Image (spheres, grey):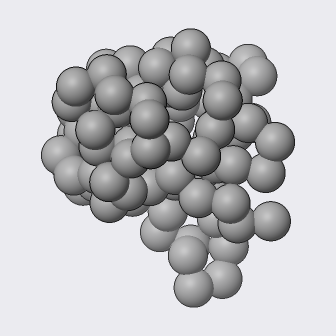
């Protein structure tokens, strides 16, 4: 389950389907990522072909990432069975 979303545009998209503030154009892919994140019980559940799932490194090593579009990634941390601090960011 998703417990908290950092990015306002991503929060509006997740809660209301409002894509007007998103930085990515592939809304269907982002919708699939968010649905998979909502259904996941552990980070590895996002290790889906094409998602390019991986753990971040360095100071972000407690966070995970999946590819949303181009340089944009959905990043998140994990607590219990919940995704927390979900964000949409261009980190490359």
The front one of 52 and 43 is: 52
**Residue placed at 38% from the left, 56% from the top?**
7
Quadrant of residue 49 in the image? top right
Quick check: 42 left or right of 51? left
Residue 4 appears in the picture as rendered: yes
- Does 53 appear above or below 30? below
The front one of 47 and 11 is: 11
Image quadrant holding the N terminus, namely top left
- Does 56 appear above or below 43? below
Give percent across and percent down for residue 42. Answer: 37, 37
- Does 41 appear above or below 12? above
Give percent across and percent down for residue 4. Answer: 21, 52
Quick check: 55 left or right of 31? right
Image quadrant holding the C terminus, namely bottom right
The front one of 27 and 49 is: 27
**Residue placed at 21% from the left, 30% from the top?**
15
Quadrant of residue 82 in the image? top left
């Amino acid at each position: 389950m998703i417990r908290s979303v950092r990015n306002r545009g991503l929060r509006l998209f997740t809660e209301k389907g409002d894509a007007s503030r998103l930085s990515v154009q592939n809304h269907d892919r982002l919708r699939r990522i968010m649905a998979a994140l909502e259904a996941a019980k552990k980070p590895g559940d996002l290790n889906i072909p094409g998602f390019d799932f991986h753990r971040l490194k360095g100071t972000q090593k407690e966070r995970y990432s999946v590819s949303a579009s181009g340089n944009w990634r959905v990043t998140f941390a994990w607590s219990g069975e919940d995704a927390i601090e979900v964000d949409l960011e261009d980190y490359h």
